[in-house]
Amino acid sequence: MLKSFRSFLSRRTFSYKLRNRVMNMFSSYENFVSIREKSEQKRKSENRPHEVLYFHKVDDPYSHLTIQYIDKLSSTYDILVKPILVGEENPEALHEPSLYDNYCIEDVRRISPFYGVNFSSDSYPNQELVDLANSILCSVEEKDFIEISKKVSDGLWQKNKTVLDELSRIHNSSNEDIVKKIQNGNKIRDECGYYFGSAFYYEKELYWGVDRINHLETRLIELGLNKSSSNELICSLHAKAPENLDSNKKINLYYYPSLNSPYTFVSTKRVREMREMYPINLFTKPVLPMLMRMMTIPDFKAKYIISDAAREGRKHDHEMKSIYSPIGKPARLAYSLFPIIDQYGKGFEYIESLLNASFQDGINIGDTVYLKELVQSLDLNWEVIKKDLNSKKWKKILNDNCDDMYSGNCWGVPSFKITNSDGSDPFYVWGQDRIWLLKEEIYKRCIN
């Protein structure tokens, strides 16, 4: 079925009706529940155990985090965890690979203390150490994989060849065996519809990294697989920032959204709440969707993004409902009004309303009647605002915003930048998953 929709998000000429129908199918809560129920029925009929696949990539910083939680998952839930060694990411799914590599290592270095994990490396291990790590893990029996892989990961990221050499005296593999095992792992990962390491797969559903273990745990608890009476999640953040923060200091928060991003939609509610509850000056800096920046998204990644964003939206009480993708002319028309609306101080409200229309109300945001009603709902004069409709001045503004985002090693949306009130000391993060980290950074700046 997916093959028939290959790269449906990437085709500007693709029937918008079919594109919207597929996006709604992937985000549907009813389909989500149905898939889970059918998967469980099939598992029972086949008398299979509750098996969770875990994809481990030795030189993936996020795998260093996830591997720390495998023992806890196995001891807390009545499941079998099957570790699978994988190699390079699927290149079709990887945009801006150099930025991606740099961002990953910085991101893990930032978030690891909040998960009680030691990760201080500021660079990737060399290929010799990576090969040595894979040689060790390719020869380890499945029952010993988690224990040994923790030692391997520590030695690898600390660039400690002595530790790896000692392990390789007991565990080592030929180059042929390494290639064969990793190719097989990649094949299994690809067949599960994923493309990176540090991910879990359980019965038709994927869970990437420590950011998604909570969804896996919640599902296991709902299935009654918790070995104790406690439903407390094992993978939780040790955050310090309060829910509300009062301070005489004001911090600048720059928000980089796009109008076709499910994850941007998921972020808007919390960005608005942060403006209300934290001492920030919010600056909205929209950018073009990736698909309008000449990037392509393969079908398997598109499916994961939409279904995962829908899952995150439900978690944050900001659910996707009826989707109408604005790619192309609708987005251009909507963007054309942003500069003048932002001059009136309503930039964020405008973008938030457009995203709600696209991802909840199924509205074509390029419709002039809709845009007029939206502008008037913001207490702005349509006769003044409409003069910029379909003008070109927005293009430079969005290009400048994109350049600024890239300067912080971010390429996807939503991205964010924090600075002091005078614009100094920029701190960039990418993704709605890191809104909690923004709060931590704002809190740290306000109390120091």
Image (spheres, grey):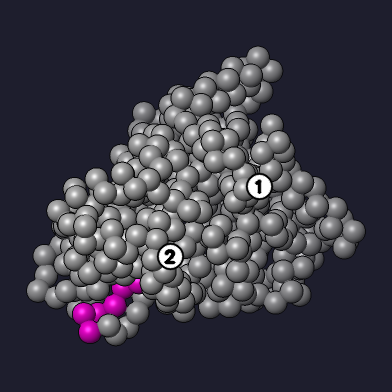
In the picture of the structure, the residue carrying the numbered disc 2 is: 287
Residue flagged by tag 1: what amino acid is it? Ser
- Report x, y in % for residue 111: 42, 64
Position of residue 352 relative to residue 122, above or below, is above
Q: Residue at left 62%, top 48%?
A: 13
Which residues fall within the magenta stretch?
Answer: 415-422
Q: Secondary structure at mark 1?
A: loop
Q: Residue at left 30%, top 39%?
A: 317
> Is residue 164 or residue 405 the one in the foreground?
405
> Is residue 192 or residue 73 the one in the foreground?
192
Whole-number angstrom distance, CA of label 2 to CA of label 1: 22 Å
Q: Residue at left 54%, top 36%?
A: 17
Residue 36 colored in magenta in the image: no
Q: Residue at left 59%, top 24%?
A: 39
Position of residue 188 relative to residue 288, above or below, is above
Residue flagged by tag 2: what amino acid is it? Val
User: How many residues crowd mark 2 within 10 Å: few (<14), some (14–19), many (20+)?
Assistant: many
Quadrant for residue 380, please give it: bottom left
Of the 4 image quadrants, the one containing the C terminus is bottom left
In the picture of the structure, the residue carrying the numbered disc 1 is: 7
> Upstream in the sequence, badge 2 or badge 1?
1
Is most of the magenta stretch helix, strand or loop? strand
